[in-house]
Each structure stands twice: as C-alpha cells, then as structure tokens.
Amino acid sequence: MNVSESLTALEGCLDRITFHNPENHYTIAKFCPKGSQNPITVVGFMPEPTAGESLKLNGTWETHPRYGQQLKILRFEVVLPATVDGIRKYLKSGVIKGLGAKTISRLIRHFGDQTLVAIESTPEKLTDVKGIGKAIAQQIAASWKSHHAVRSLMIFLQNHGISLSHSGRIFKQYGAAAVDTLKDHPYQIACDIPGIGFYIADRIARQQGAASDDPLRIRACILYLLEQAAADGHMFMTGQEARRKCARLFDIDAESAAGALLALAGEGQVVQEAMGDSGGDHALYLSSLHRVEVGIARRLKAFLSVPVHPPDINQEQMTREILARLAIQLSLEQQSVLEEILLHHIAIITGGPGTGKTTLIRSIAAICDRLRQKTILCAPTGRAARRLSEVARKKASTLHKLLGFNLEDNDFEKDEDDPLDVDVMIVDEASMVDAQLMFHLLKAVPVTATLIMVGDVFQLPSVGPGNILSDLIQSGVIRTFELKEIFRQAEKSPIVVNAHRVRQGSLPNLEKDRQSEKLSEFYFIEQYQPETVVKTIVELCSRKIPQRFGLDPVRDIQVLTPMHKGTVGTIQLNQVLQEALNPTASSGAGIQFRPGDKVMHLRNNYAKEVFNGDIGVISEIDGSKRRLSVNYDERIVDYESEEVDDLTLAYAISVHKSQGSEYPAVVIPLMPQHHPLLQRNLLYTAITRGKKLVIIVGTRQALDTAIKNDKPGNRLSMLDHRLRNG
C-alpha cells in the first residue's frame, strides 16, 4: 500500500458508512467534500459515524491495491449545524437514538437554532416541549452525552498526539468519565490497561506539567517494564536491568527507582527476591507471577512427597495388553518408559518428531484402562486437543475447558477445594503451557493422581510467561523420559530428518535426490527479493503444489511466516493469497471476508466451542445483516455482526499460531527482513508442522541465521532453582 505523506484538509459530510467496528471505532466511509459531487473513500477511527454529519478531516492519501485511493483520517472534527434546516437534517440522521420525526419538529419549533444547545446544556428544559416528559428528556440527554463522550475522548487524544486506535479500549474502561480520568489521574490508565497504558499516561501527564521524577510516574514506569518483561515470556526482571531501562528510556535515576520499588513492594504489587549467585542483584516480580512460580514449586513438591503404589501389572502383561488393544509392538525404549512411568506421580515424556510420543500416550491410556484408572487426555489449545483425540483415538479436552475457565471472572472453577476426578492425567503439547495455566492445573489435579506431561522442549515456548517444560526438565527433580530413537518409517522422511538436523543446530539437507522419481517432502527455493518470494508463494499455493501433490490450495496448504508486518508478513501475504485463491466479488456491507475464505478464530469462545487459533472456511455470508458462517471440520459456526472481528484471514499465519497443529503442506518464507524472529526453535516448530510437504522460500543467509540463533530459550525464571533448592 503506497502512502503519500502530504497532509490533506477537507470539509464536507459523510455520505455513507461502509464499515464500522463498534469495539475500536475503525470506520470505512464515503465522504462528500464541499463543492464536489463525487464521494471519496475515507478510513480511520471515528466513533458512531452517522450519514449526513458534517466533518472537518485531516489525513493522508493512500493507494490501496484493491480499492484504490482513499484518505486515511489522522484528525477529525464534527461541525455542528447552526441553521434550523441543518439541525433538522442532523437530528433526522439518527445521531440521537429513538428521536422520531414528530419530536424533532416539536423541538425545533420550540428552540429554533438553539435546539442543540438546549439538548447539551439545559436538557431539563426539554420537558417544556409538548409530548416530552421527564423520562424522554433524560433519554435524549443521555444519548447525546454518550454520543459525544467518545468524541470528546478522541479530541482529547488528538490534542495530545495519541493514536485514535486506543480510544475504544480507553472508553470501554472508563466510559463517559474517560476524559476526566485522563486529566485528573493520568497514570491510572497505566494500571488499568497494561501494554498501551503507560506511554499514553506519560504523554498526557508530562504535557500537563508532571515532573519526570513524580513518584506516580516512576511507579507506573516500573510496573510497565515488568509487564513488558512478562509479555516477552519472562517471569521477572533483574533489578539492574530495571534501573538501566528506567534511566535510558524514561530519564529516571537509580535512587528514585529504588524508592518507587520499595513503595510498590510495601503495597504488595512487586516482590523483590535475591538471585543467589548473581553478585547481589535481585529478581523483580509482579506479585501475581511470584505467587504463581512459588505455587508451582510447592505443588510439585507435594506431588513428589506422596508415596507411589506400583500398578498390579508386569511388563509381559503390558506388552500383551498393547498388542491386544492397539495391535502395536512397542520398541524397547517405549517399553522401558511404559514400565516405569506409572511409578511416578509426576513425569515428563519428551522427544523430537518420529520418536513415538503419541504411540506412547495411546499405550499409557490403554494400560490405565486395563487397570480401571480414570484417565484424562488434554492439551493447551483446541487444535492440539482435537489432534490428540484423533491420533490417540480417545476423547481429549482443552485445559481451560477441563479446569472450568470462567471468562467473566477470568478464573478457574477447579482447584484444591474442588479437584478433578482423575487417576492419570496426560497433558500433550506441554511446551505450550505457560506458568499461570500450569499453576491452575497443578492446583486442580489431586496429588495422589499421576500427571504425565508430553512435549517437545525444542519447540517454541508458551506465548504467556514462563518456560515450564524446560525448567522442569533442567531442575532434574522431575523424572524425565527422553525418546531418542527415530522409528524406521520416520527415518525415511526428509521432514523428520531435517527437523532433527535443525534441532541439533545443523543446516537441513537441501540437496535433491536426482536418482529418485518420487516427489520429495522437503524443498528449499532460493529467492533474494521479498516481492519475488511473495510471487513464488502465490505460485506454489495456487498452482504448483495442487497440481503436483494433489492438495487443496485452501484447506491443505498453510503458509507460516515469522512476522505480521512487511512484504512477507501475514497481513500482506493474506491479501495477495486471498486474491489468488478466492478471487470472488467482495461480500459487501463492510465485511472484508468472502465466501470460501480461509479464516482463523482469534479468542477462546467456550459457548461456540471455538478456540484461539482454530482455522475454518467461510461457508456463507449474509451481507445485509453482517452475519457469516464458518465451517470448522464440517461443523458450522455462526457469527453475528459484533463477532465478525473475532476472525482474521488465515491463508498465512504466524508460526506461533501454528503450534499444536499439523498441515498436509507448509510453505515457510525466510528472509533477512525477519531478523528479529529468526530463531532455531521457530524454524524447527515451523518445519514440524508439515505432514507431507515442507517448502522454505528465501535466502540461505536467513536460514543460517535462524539455525545459529539458539538464545531465545533463555527466559528469566527461578522455577528450576526453587525445585532444586527447596
């Protein structure tokens, strides 16, 4: 998308609203400039836009690849009409909900060109108009106030140079009191809206004269830094790093930072803890994460302290049982694990692709059934749970559903007081379980039960803070079984072989077997320019892979990219792949999707049983009602207008979003531009998502960089220390 930087000022009226997101106020509309009969397209953040409203706009021209020229709104101002005719037209546009034509006429007859002034300033006088009682007058005043409160907030943000994209979250938090809160208690937003709050609060406070060493500012700054550390996966931040960032980023001296830390610790918001052999440095935890880490360690020690009663079955009986129930002959390595694992209340099974982790899960479940032990299979995500259920041929659940997660309270029903009814629990894809989820899981599983965690520690760690599976293994306290033997069938797979090479820090084997007439499973296509990479990916997905491998271009091929932005990020790739794979007419009514589009659900919805990362295909769109239906593996889920924003295009997704899933074919762009995310575990995770075909498109330099970069696993945590040292 090309953007012209010159600022354009226009005045005119809104002709038609094409699209409006009530959550964040993002709007696409047709706008008629004064003196022109030809409406233009404008895009930006505007609250409750109404056709017929007069506006002053400031923005920059963009050229959209599909929709052409449009004005991106940077600032706007509502121009209220001053004439009787203008006021009549303005009120008839529906700006005040429930105000009919007769009532509008009566208001204007009574107040004339002062009608809007009366509504805003003296709403009690509205009862002087025939047919308007006290209740209706209050309703009119409330509707006007609500409509203009959002606009007052946007004007306030504009005046302080803050992006209007934040207005939706701020208004949702504070409602009509948003502007007063930002004026009187600006740093409150840093506490209430983590992530975006501090920078907004700091800009407002500093412009209103707050000093750089204001204690409220310093405390908000430290909390912000700790929240950012948690967002990066760390359980804590070192005191030295916190002081350095306070000074470098926010001009806060060490003494002031130390005073603020003492105050935060005294209030119970932050915990400072000595790090042992760190030269006197301290770990700084958000109190919630400290409670979680300490709680995990205590609960694990409780599991380890309970005596284990050996199961009443020997190895020979186990072997016969597995053969009878599953028709599987386990390897010696698998037999050894199966024989020993039920002798522990808590244990870990790890290993790379092709080492038989899933077969072992099935075998453990079969033996538990034979012993009449209640066994539960679960995984962190809906995708991983469904995949586990398919391969294990036994019902599996998501951890959130199993633990009774309540979205309204943001808490779990199951805990020590109301534990799960289970003898053996098997958690697959355990590398995806973050610290907070593990804490709630351990509280809900009885310490007399057996908890088995299965996962590949070399995959990407959890999105949330913590590096649980790795910490538990490194502690040496939890019995860990590592499967190393690659099964004969998997040994022949270039995907499995190259995944293990990457895991060990070696380049994949990129040489083609020219003697074989069979199609390979693994390809590297060298391209140096981002634009050429995009063209190659489109050609692969739309023509070459479907023709040569017989795969469906939408359902079977998944593009996995390290980043969202840029030429080879998810946003751009989804646009070009949508045009190539589903070039139908737009659905209209402001919906950016089309029937047949591949889409991903973005947040857990337990009522619909659709979870963050689930991928489906749009089966139907009702443009008039902004309603659509998505087919998730032959299960149709309907979305109302306000739920459409839970979906995004999914022809290309991030590698992080692919965790717990497998696809017949994956295409992976890998370019130097991806440098911030070129990591060995990210490449390894992407490769292991492919079942039949993996194609990397990019440069050998980027491939080499990713394989050499094995640092991202170093998340700050003291869990392994707590487990080892009591």
Image (spheres, grey):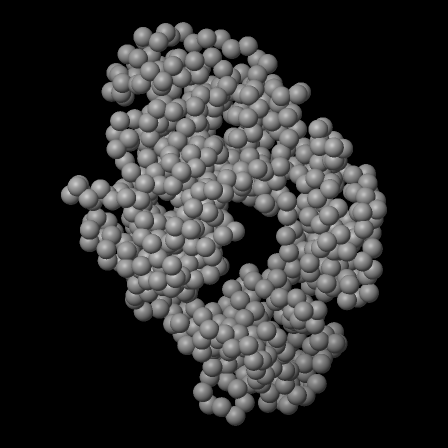
**Residue lying at 74% horizontally and 50% vertically, measured from the top left:** 246
Residue 415 located left or right of residue 343: right
Q: Residue furthest bottom?
A: 35
Q: Quadrant of the C terminus?
A: top right
Give the total of numbered labels: 0
Q: Nearer the viewer, residue 177 or 368?
A: 368
Instruction: Give the x, y percent position of residue 128.
Output: 72, 79
Q: Nearer the viewer, residue 638 or 44?
A: 44
Q: Quadrant of residue 249?
A: bottom right
Residue 183 located left or right of residue 289: right
Does residue 382 appear anywhere in the picture?
A: no
**Residue lying at 65% horizontally and 25% vertically, measured from the top left:** 722
Residue 482 located left or right of residue 693: right
Q: Is residue 139 above or below residue 281?
A: below
Q: Quadrant of residue 577?
A: bottom left
**Residue lying at 25% horizontally and 33% vertically, measured from the top left:** 492
Q: Residue furthest left?
A: 517
Q: Is residue 262 above or below residue 59?
A: above
Q: Nearer the viewer, residue 50 or 588?
A: 588
Does residue 403 appear anywhere in the picture?
A: yes
**Residue lying at 62% horizontally and 34% vertically, measured from the top left:** 717
Instruction: Give the x, y percent position of residue 254.
Output: 80, 47
Instruction: Give the x, y percent position of residue 109.
Output: 65, 87
Instruction: Give the x, y percent position of residue 405.
Output: 54, 38
Q: Quadrant of the N terminus?
A: bottom left
Q: Is residue 188 above or below residue 239?
A: below
Q: Quadrant of residue 371?
A: top left
